């Protein structure tokens, strides 16, 4: 039988829950071509939300929706190649159309087209020849605007893991180039999203950066417990098993409503359940996830300095004021001037999240639980 929960893949259809408010607001903004930036820690549901909204908008024939993930694009050239292919895929549906569009709009540098072995799929190949690099890039960046304007359509472009543009050889120059083009695109809306809050806030919230005030920033929250409970109980019932509301709530609490882990823990509990889930089963399921991750966490800890580990312990204990003398002593954190270094190092490693005006939080609830058990 099919498994009732999903994690590690974008959640869709019956695996997708909640997000009504967010879906509505995202749809309205994108259809109105307002640029949107979505930020949340990883595995909270950005990709799932954008996929859902993008698929709905695609049903409306007035819109083209291009989706690309630039996680694996390490250079500008890789970005441009992925970008062209996403635009072409969204706006053409036959090979002839694909080649016609390339000839018409990208003729000046005539990119190479690669066909798959069975000729079923095709894309613009690796060796895009940038004869005149700047000119070709201008053409590529303006492609969606030109296609949309000439065909009387609107283009929406969704770029996942956008913070990666900060890793390119000349990140500011690159961003300046994108912004210079994109701000003139009156038939195109951009949805840019990613996980590294500090990096994205620097890109979009820092007035010295090219993307300052490019669009509205949406901080995606976790999914509320009251949405999770009926989701979990219904998924159990659909497969002839049963879990009470109280135990569904326990699943949510044990992983602090973290979307990925809620689905994982629910799945593990479901697998252990014959017909009726019990508290013991939920606890066993939780332990099994902690055990699966044990080696990963051990390696992680091995790569940290003693003070960094102490700092994580303090966060896990809910400490708020890190510069207080008692805290510095109790957790052996060094001088208060050192806290900033610790914070930055842990941010770089993606282990913590700093919510402006709020406290520092560990990103991974299973890691937090594991860490608390490691205490001497
Ligand atoms: N709306 C949702 N309903 C149910 N589960 C979700 C939802 N959003 C996310 N999840 C769970 O979280 C996991 C990670 O979601 P994903 O969209 O990949 O997050 P992100 O893009 O923020 O890293 C999914 O595989 C799924 O288990
Ligand atoms: Mg994602």
Image: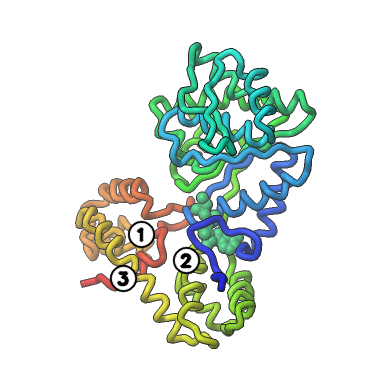
Residue at 54% from the left image edge and 87% from the top image edge: 275
Q: Earlier in the sequence, mark 1 or mark 3?
A: 1
The secondary structure type at the circle numbered 1 is: loop
Q: Nearer the viewer, residue 46 or 201?
A: 46
Q: Is mark 1 within 8 Å of ligand 1?
A: no
Residue at 38% from the left image edge and 26% from the top image edge: 169
Q: Nearer the viewer, residue 209 or 241?
A: 241
Q: Nearer the viewer, residue 1 or 326?
A: 1
Question: Residue furthest toward the front?
Answer: 118
Between circles 1 and 3, the one closer to the viewer is 3
> Residue 124, position in %: x, y?
54, 28
Question: Dot 3 corresponds to which residue?
Answer: 372
Residue at 71% from the left image edge and 43% from the top image edge: 29
Where is 344 relative to 288, above or below? above
Residue 2 quadrant:
bottom right
> Residue 41, position in %: x, y?
48, 53
> Distance of mark 1 from mark 2, alpha carbons?
29 Å
Question: Dot 2 corresponds to which residue?
Answer: 261
Question: Dot 1 corresponds to which residue?
Answer: 321
Residue at 72% from the left image edge and 53% from the top image edge: 24
* Neighbourhood count class around disc 2 (C-alpha, 10 Å): few under 14, some 14–19, many 20 upward: many
Q: Which of the numbered marks, if any, corresponds to residue 255?
A: none
Q: Are marks 3 and 2 in contact (CB under 8 Å)?
A: no
The secondary structure type at the circle numbered 2 is: helix
């Amino acid at each position: 039988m099919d498994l009732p929960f999903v994690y590690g893949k974008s959640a869709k259809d019956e695996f997708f829950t909640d997000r009504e408010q967010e879906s509505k607001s995202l749809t309205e903004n994108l259809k109105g071509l307002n640029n949107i930036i979505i930020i949340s820690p990883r595995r909270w549901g950005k990709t799932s939300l954008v996929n859902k909204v993008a698929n709905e908008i695609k049903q409306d024939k007035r819109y083209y929706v291009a989706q690309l993930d630039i996680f694996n694009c390490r250079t500008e050239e890789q970005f441009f190649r992925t970008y062209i292919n996403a635009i072409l895929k969204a706006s053409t549906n036959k090979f002839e159309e694909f080649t016609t569009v390339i000839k018409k709009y990208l003729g000046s540098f005539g990119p190479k087209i690669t066909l798959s072995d069975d000729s079923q799929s095709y894309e613009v190949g690796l060796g895009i020849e940038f004869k005149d690099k700047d000119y070709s890039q201008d053409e590529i960046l303006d492609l969606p605007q030109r296609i949309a304007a000439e065909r009387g359509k609107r283009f929406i472009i969704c770029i996942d893991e956008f913070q990666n543009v900060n890793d390119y050889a000349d990140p500011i120059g690159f961003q300046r180039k994108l912004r210079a083009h994109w701000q003139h695109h009156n038939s195109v809306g951009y949805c840019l999203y990613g996980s590294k809050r500090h990096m994205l806030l620097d890109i979009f919230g820092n007035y010295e950066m090219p993307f300052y005030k490019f669009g509205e920033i949406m901080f995606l929250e976790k999914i509320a417990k009251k949405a999770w409970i009926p989701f979990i109980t219904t998924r159990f019932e659909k497969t002839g098993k049963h879990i009470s509301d109280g135990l569904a709530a326990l699943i949510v609490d044990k992983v602090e409503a973290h979307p990925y882990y809620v689905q994982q823990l629910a799945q593990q509990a479901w697998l252990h359940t014959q017909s009726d889930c019990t508290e013991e089963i939920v606890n066993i399921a939780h332990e099994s996830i902690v055990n699966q991750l044990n080696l990963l966490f051990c390696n992680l800890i091995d790569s940290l300095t003693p003070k960094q580990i102490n700092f994580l312990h303090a966060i896990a204990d809910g400490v708020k004021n890190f510069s207080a003398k008692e805290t510095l002593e109790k957790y052996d954190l060094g001088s208060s001037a050192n806290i900033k270094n610790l914070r930055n190092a842990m941010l770089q490693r993606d282990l913590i999240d700093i919510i402006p005006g709020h406290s520092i939080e560990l990103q991974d609830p299973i890691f937090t639980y594991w860490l608390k058990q490691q205490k001497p």
